[in-house]
Amino acid sequence: MNHSINDGFESISPALLQPSICAGVQVRTALFEQVIDGLSALITSLRDPETEILRFPPVMSRDQLVKSGYLHSFPHLLGCVSSLQGDESQVRGSLERSNGDWIAGLSATELVLSPAACYPLYPLVATRKPVPGSGLLFDVASYCFRREATHEVDRLQAFRMREYVCIGTSEQSLDFRARWIPKAEELARRLGLPCRIAPASDPFFGRAGRLAAMIQVEQALKFELLIPVHSQDQPTACMSFNYHRDHFGTTWDLQTDTGETAHTACVAFGLDRLALALFATHGLDLQVWPATARNALSV
Ligand code: AMP
Ligand code: ZN
């Protein structure tokens, strides 16, 4: 039975998310954060040994994101950081010239808002030694931004993403992903969340993008774990399981120690969506949540 957080943006309970002036940009309450903290600790408890932990800020290099192909594939979702640049007199000059329209004086900086937690990882690893034969595992996280066109309860512009990433051979990357799908289903089961795994595609831009999305499904590059949040008929992607083949390996010249181009895979947890799925499924009162979920989350 789903609860009433799921009737649209206007009706989301202020016990979870307080209204903010922009759709999809929410203020989280203590109740919501308690569950986010529980989820983060639960995900940590499932981490593979020998995993390097990195926490990224919500901004990353614009050049690196463009080189990763993001502008080509998802220009509609990208958010750039702009500022009033120059010394004090130049900044004052653009404010005065703008006659109240200070936006006109903005120029793009070298930063963009990170659209996913793993993008900054690959160029960082490329600055190190070749990837060892056993492969590399990472635990990364950041606040992410996507300029979403619609704002359902669970489609935020700013949201938290936690990811486990594998960099290694194609076999290691595919094994990593294959191992994580049942682990994620088990995690959902412990949380009392009804879920299913489905093939998926990313929201590529334009007509060429529709072809890219078809190829992604055809080649089984992306799967999602779906849980009903705002609708039973259209369950929400709360986690994704992605195999990038050698895309990032080629882009960043990531090599294995045998001199081959590295392959990569990532498992992404949408923390805000998982929290919303829990509240939508079990209600706002943590005391009445199933014992397995309360134990798993320590709430
Ligand atoms: P993706 O890179 O699109 O597979 O996203 C990874 C995960 O981030 C998804 O499975 C969602 O749980 C979460 N996510 C993606 N977009 C949004 C959004 N607009 N609002 C909230 N969570 C999101
Ligand atoms: Zn990723």
Image: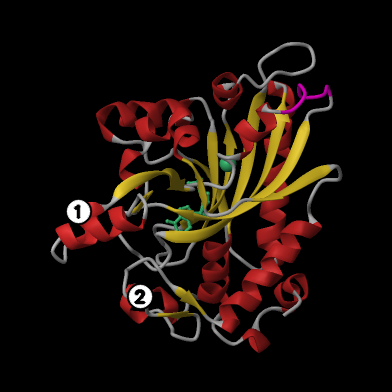
Label 2 belongs to which residue? Answer: 7
In this rendering, is residue 243 above or below 188? above
The answer to whether residue 13 of the structure is visible from this angle is yes
The spot of residue 156 in percent (x, y) is 41, 62
Q: Which residues are magenta?
A: 128-133
The spot of residue 27 in percent (x, y) is 46, 76
The answer to whether residue 149 of the structure is visible from this angle is no
**Left or right of residue 7, residue 272 in this image:** right
Instruction: Compare marks 1 and 2 and give the one earlier in the sequence.
Output: 2
The spot of residue 11 in percent (x, y) is 35, 81
Beta carbon at label 1 within 8 Å of ligand 1: no
Classify 10 Å Cα crowding around label 2: few (below 14), some (14-19), many (20 and above). Answer: some
- Residue type at the position of mark 2: Asp
- Residue type at the position of mark 1: Ala
Residue reaching furthest to the top: 259
Please check the rendered image and state whether residue 131 is part of the magenta-colored stretch, yes or no. yes
The number of callouts visible is 2
